[in-house]
Image (cartoon, rainbow, N blue to C red):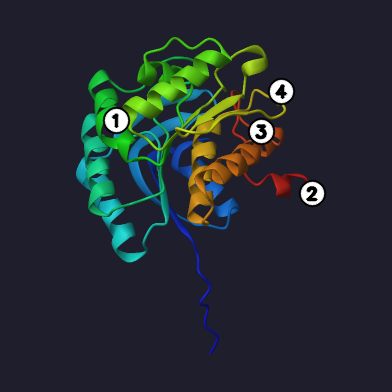
Amino acid sequence: MITNTTFIPVALTIAGSDSGGGAGIQTDLRTFAFHCVHGTSAITCITAQNTLGVTRVDAMSSDTVVAQIQAVVEDIGVHAAKTGMLLNQEIITAVSQQITAYNIENLVVDPVMVSRTGAQLIDDDAVQTLRNKLIPQAAIITPNRYEAQILSGLEIASLADMQAAAEIMHKELAVKAVLVKGGGMSGSLRGVDVWFDGEQLEILTTKQIETKNTHGTGCTLSAAIAANLALGKDLWTAVQIAKEYVTNALTYSLDIGKGQGPVGHFFPLLTK
């Protein structure tokens, strides 16, 4: 009889479903799979979505979200987790309670509050609950430019602003590390990220990829960080590997649909 005793790291994504497959749960699971991590999920909302945009969003009940988390953790276990779109105050509170109840470590919080274009996606009560309850539980948060503005209270227009915002968020939000994403910045700062963990302030730069197909980059980055944490990498190493992965996925982004296509998560297969 053949038995398989190989250790398989497990990552959990708590996020929304994207029917177009470009972001959310679908993107997270593809990213986990690329890193040879078993992906599990708790769906917070269902979106009717494609490359042109979102036409409908339906929230799951907080009880349904909790049941999904419990089903995964109590049987399979979780080595790292990430959150994406949590949609409302009730879901955010419920998720935070489950993180505490199961002592889930290696938590990556992508504080999905504002789109890359600056449109607010959740209401002010949900923002405050995310800020006060969930973010302090995170090993790292990955806000975009506009989310960093809300969380830090700073207007961000320069690299110095990004650095200052990272330091403010680290101090005021009691989070272990902050990665301010530069995807929403302009000019030479587009795609430049800033890392701060209380001691180390780093600027992460890569080559700029000229493509309109960037849907799901934020989800992909946070999922890649979680996957690498599940694999046992330290936080700074996980961030560097994730950044490189996203750059490669952007290089082989998918020109599908009539609008903004997704990144190419399985880019080695696309180069054959």
* Element under disc 1: helix
Residue under label 1: 130
Q: Where in the figure is residue 4, as x and y percent of width and height?
A: 52, 78
Q: Which residue does the image show at 53% across and 9% down from the upper left? A: 157
Frontmost residue, 26 versus 198: 198
Q: Which residue does the image show at 25% across and 34% down from the upper left? A: 133
Q: Where in the figure is residue 85, as x and y percent of width and height?
A: 37, 33
Q: Is 260 placed left or right of 24 in the picture? A: right
> For the residues carrying marks 3 and 2, which lies nearer the camera in this image?
3
The image quadrant of residue 88 is top left
Q: Which residue does the image show at 44% across and 43% down from the upper left? A: 25
> For the residues carrying marks 1 and 3, which lies nearer the camera in this image?
1
Label 1 to label 3: alpha-carbon separation: 29 Å
Q: Classify mark 4: residues with Cα within 10 Å, few (<14), some (14-19) or many (20+).
A: few
Looking at the picture, which amino acid does disc 4 mark?
Answer: Glu
Which of marks 3 and 4 precedes in the sequence?
4
> For the residues carrying marks 2 and 4, which lies nearer the camera in this image?
4
- Quick check: 45 above or below 209? below
Label 4 to label 3: alpha-carbon separation: 9 Å
Which of marks 4 and 2 precedes in the sequence?
4
Q: Which residue does the image show at 44% across and 9% down from the upper left? A: 155
Looking at the picture, which amino acid does disc 1 mark?
Answer: Leu
* Element under disc 3: helix
Q: Which mark is residue 272?
A: 2
Residue under label 3: 250
Q: Which mark is residue 210?
A: 4
Q: Classify mark 3: residues with Cα within 10 Å, few (<14), some (14-19) or many (20+).
A: many
